[in-house]
Each structure stands twice: as C-alpha cells, then as structure tokens.
Amino acid sequence: MSPAISYAFATRNNDDTYRLPTRPTIAYNPGNPTVLLPNGAVPAQSTSYARTYDGWSPSLALSYRPDNIQTFFAAGSRSFEPPTHDDLLATVNGTPNSSPGRLNPPQPFAPLAAFTTPDLKAQTATTIEGGWRGRTERFSWDAVVYHSWVDNELLSLRDATGASLGAVNADRTTHFGIELGVGAKLTDRLSGRVAYTFQDFRFDNDPVRSNNRLAGAPPHLIHVQLQYQATEAWMLQGAVRWSPGRVPVDNMNTLYANSYVVADLRTEYKINKTFRVFGEITNLFNETYASSTLIVDQARPDQAAFLPGDGRGFYAGIKATL
C-alpha cells in the first residue's frame, strides 16, 4: 500500500505594458494573398490578469505479487491541473489572411477584440485504475484499465480557419481507456510485440455537446513490431502503426479523420562495442493520411482541418556509446 498526498499553489500573472489607445492590424486580400490591404487598427484592450489556483492531490496505490513473475496493481487518485498562460491569453478574431482583431480583412477599422483572457478554472479529475503485468522466459504482458471523471477540462478551441478561439472549461467529461501489450520471443532470433490502446473520451451530458466524443482522441491505436536478429551484430526490424477507427475533428462530431496504416522498416549493425550504424525507412508504402487534425468545436465543410502525415522517409546514421 502506498498512500500519498500533495498540495499545489499556482499563480498566473500577466502585465500588459502596451499603452497606446489602438493596436495595429494587417491583412492581405483573401482572393489574392500577395496583395496587401490597407493597414488598420482596433481599440486596445488590457490583457493584464492575476489568477491564483490551489488544490490537493491525494492518491492511494495497492500492489500484489503472487509470485516472482506477476504483479497486480490498483490505484485511485485526485489530480489538479491549473491553466497555463497559453490557456489564459489567446489571440482571436484573425484569419489566415489577417492579423488578430481583423476578422474581415477588407474592413481595417472594425472594432473587434484581438485578445481574450478567459477566467478559467483549474481542471481536476478523479481516476481509478488497475492492471496486471508479468514476464516469463519467452513472454511478457501488460494490461491496464482506467476511468477518469474530469471536472472543468481545459479545451483549446479553434474556428473554421484554424485561428485560435482561446480556451474554455468543459463542465464534466469522462476518460475511459484500456492499454494492452504482449511480447514474445518466438525463436532464439525472432521476437515480436503487439500494443493496443483503446480510448473513449466523452462529454458528460453537456448542454451543447451532449455525450459526444472529445475531438482529437483516436479511439483505437495498434502498434505491431517484429524483430529478427540475423547475426550477433545485425538486426532487422519491421513495424506497423495502425489507427483503425475514425477520429472526430470537432466536438460536435460532424467531421472525422479516416483510419490509416503505416509500415516502417529499420536495420542496425553493431560495428564494435562503441559504434553502431543504422538505416530506416518510415511510411514504407508512402501512405497519404492525416496524422492529426485541428481541434474545433463545430467543423465546416469548407475548412482545412487535417494535418498530413509525413510521406516516405529515409534515415541513416551512426551511434556511439562511450
């Protein structure tokens, strides 16, 4: 049994030293982004703030080893996470063709805010988890399951253009997950490992988003690796990264990123006790996929929301161990 408790006190202070009555804006023509529009200005607003946060984080962990190869464990905890300055101060009302405060590029003097300083609460969560891990001469395994009840989760939102809207507190959310891993020594030279992650992150009866899934969290992730020790010095390795489920781009769950599979190859040769050379090919089949997305509250059909993954890549190098 391992009980613990901690206390955290955090301050977040910002002093705006800008003293002019207006802030300048700049914009380019949306129809011809190389053409500069007339410079403009918006009323200045103070971005100063002084916030304090404090909270207790108790936890209790239990572990049991019935023999030398297995361990069972369980834990319960309460966590506390204050917002950062990135959450508390954000530029807003900009577009890909204009600076903050210039939501409509052709209108240089439209009185819009260029910053937001939301009065955010600290994020807290109650989490329970349990698992089992073990190892034999040829096999190893890990299994973990957890559930978190989160209050005031900090969400960083963007509009349809990708411009920041600042951070907000969700009311209540839940995070449920399972992590599984199995390794095996198939022969004296061949070994493999499979890792699987399941994530179900949702709003909890939110008045706007109901029980929708939180944007940006892949529901399934699978990683498979196979390694062959051809000689004492030469190693070959293949890996597959698979995201088999659709990932929500927005919290309203109207737009999703598609599943994808990416394969990688790697080899390494040990020259001596000090030096190793290696070569690697990532995304072997040059798969076109979205490795991640912008996280927005409500997606639009005409927005650019997908961030492409890297195409086929070649790497080589040398390692030295002193």
Image (cartoon, helix red, strand yellow):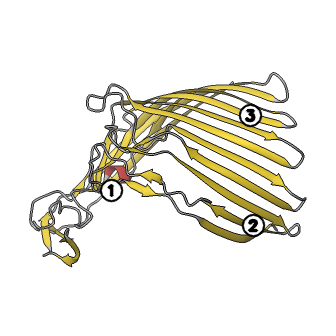
Q: Residue under circle 2?
A: 278
Dot 3 amino acid type: Trp
**What residue is disc 1 on?**
304
Lateral position of residue 244 relative to residue 130, left or right: left
Q: Residue at x 38, y 41 (%)?
A: 154
For label 3, count other residues whose C-alpha is less than 10 Å away and answer few (under 14), some (14-19) or many (20+). Answer: some
Closer to us: 163 or 290: 290
**Corner quadrant of residue 30:** bottom left
Residue plotted at (11% across, 67% down): 106
Circle 1 packing at 10 Å, graded few (<14), some (14-19), many (20+), is few
Location of residue 31 in the rendering, given as x and y in whole percent from the top left corner: 19, 69
Q: Secondary structure at mark 1?
A: loop
Q: Is residue 171 left or right of residue 47?
A: right
Residue type of the residue flagged with mark 1? Ala
Q: What residue does disc 3 label?
A: 141
Residue 270, image x, y percentages: 84, 66
What amino acid does circle 2 point to? Phe
Q: Are marks 1 and 3 in contact (CB under 8 Å)?
A: no
Label 1 to label 3, Cα distance in Å?
41 Å
Residue at x 65%, y 34% (from the top left corner) = 180
